[in-house]
Image (cartoon, rainbow, N blue to C red):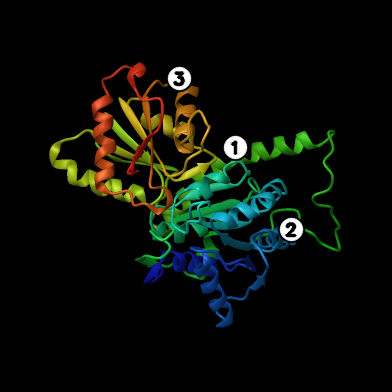
Amino acid sequence: MGKVVPLSGNSAVAYAVKSADVDVISAYPITPQTTIVEKLAEFIANGELDAEMIHVESEHSALSAAVGAAAAGARVYTASSSQGIALMYEIMFIASSLRLPIVMTIATRALSAPINIWNDHSDFMAVSDTGWIMMMAENNQEAHDDIILAYKIAENPEVLLPVVTALDGYFMTHTTEPINVIEREEALSFAPKRKTWFTLDPDKPVTMGALGDPQWYFEFKKQQYEAMKKSREVIERSIDEFARVFGRRYNAVEFYGDENPEVVLVAMGHVVGNIRAYLNKMRSKNSRVGVLKVKLYRPFPEDLIVRYLEDVEIIGVVDRALIPGSSSPGPLHSEIVTALRKHEVNTKTLSFVTGLGGRPVTHEHIGVMLSKLSELKDKPVSELPREPLFIGVRE
């Protein structure tokens, strides 16, 4: 196994990218992502990584260059945050529709306006319709390991889709943890470099991104849909293999708490760790509570969600993003409710919106959410709040 090194979240990601032996890095600086690619530039300058670093004038160009490099068969990496992700948005659809196995890290940050450089999940949630596989880490070790997992999944010939890995800005990107670094030989043994997709080759010419007229466009989109469905099997196999090789398991969905919970919070990202710590403090009170961590957001693991939640009295979904005007303004809450109702599960749900713009989600806030759930768990559905509950906001 690799050596243990104290690393920030961004450095942990950069070390994993180096170990994956990428060929091309294309990125534009934006807080709080910048130090990922700065560290990669340092690796290249020191001769520790033999890769091409493409300096571009915008995030739109960064992902465009990544598309071109991946189309030529290179193992490609990029990273961004917030408005950078918004500027990439057009090209994200192109990357997934062309079935290019690009890996991109989002150092999650609130979208403007007003301008905000701190963390929430609005940029991550904004890309959920672009056709990328999406994973979010809870801690820096997981963010490091997700990079190696991502290449294993993306380049699998049964998948061939780009992958987003995410870690929370500042709470993770700029805080230091001990990281068991996966070395290059280990990474390439687990996720070997192989061209499993059609590539641009002067000796075997192909056309990519040509006009998809009504005679063919529909079929392309159906194939993309099937690839995303198929990726669940590949993701699960990759998780199992990663656990066997490295001794760390990152399930698509993970439960922590009482074996027979009445009340469960559902959350993503570093907040899950805060909730775990709070539940540990509550153990002496014999509270039947738990937390369900959602790591895999696309494809959404609805079967696992339902398995964990179908016998729970009431759940509270913790969203760190807000979609004004939606029937369910919390995007994670919307997915959870849809999954439950699709499988005819009538577990009661509450939507909590909290931590926007970098506001910390404290133990006090977690206590408020759990108290509200306990207060309402025996109430009929008709008496539950229909609007999201905003936790930690000034009235």
Left of 214 or right of it: where is 162? left
Q: Are marks 1 and 3 in contact (CB under 8 Å)?
A: no
Kindly indicate the quadrant of the structure image that contains residue 180.
bottom left
Q: Amino acid at mark 1?
A: Lys
Q: How many C-alpha atoms fall within 10 Å of the one at disc 3: few (<14), some, or many (≥20)?
A: few
Question: Residue 96 at x, y = what percent?
Answer: 67, 48
Question: Residue 324 at x, y = what percent?
Answer: 51, 36
Instruction: Give the farthest residue toward the front.
Output: 395
Q: Amino acid at mark 2?
A: Ala
Circle count: 3
Q: Which element carries disc 2, helix, strand or loop?
A: helix
Residue to which mark 3 is pinned: 344
Which quarter of the rendered picture does the N terminus lie within? Answer: bottom left
Q: How many C-alpha atoms fall within 10 Å of the one at disc 1: few (<14), some, or many (≥20)?
A: some
Question: Residue 49 at x, y = what percent?
Answer: 57, 76
Instruction: Give the farthest residue toward the left.
Output: 284
**Looking at the image, is 112 positioned above or below residue 232?**
below
Residue 229 tag number: 1
Q: Which badge, 1 or 3, comes first in the chain's sequence?
A: 1
Residue to which mark 2 is pinned: 71
Q: Which badge, 2 or 1, comes first in the chain's sequence?
A: 2
Q: Which element carries disc 1, helix, strand or loop?
A: helix
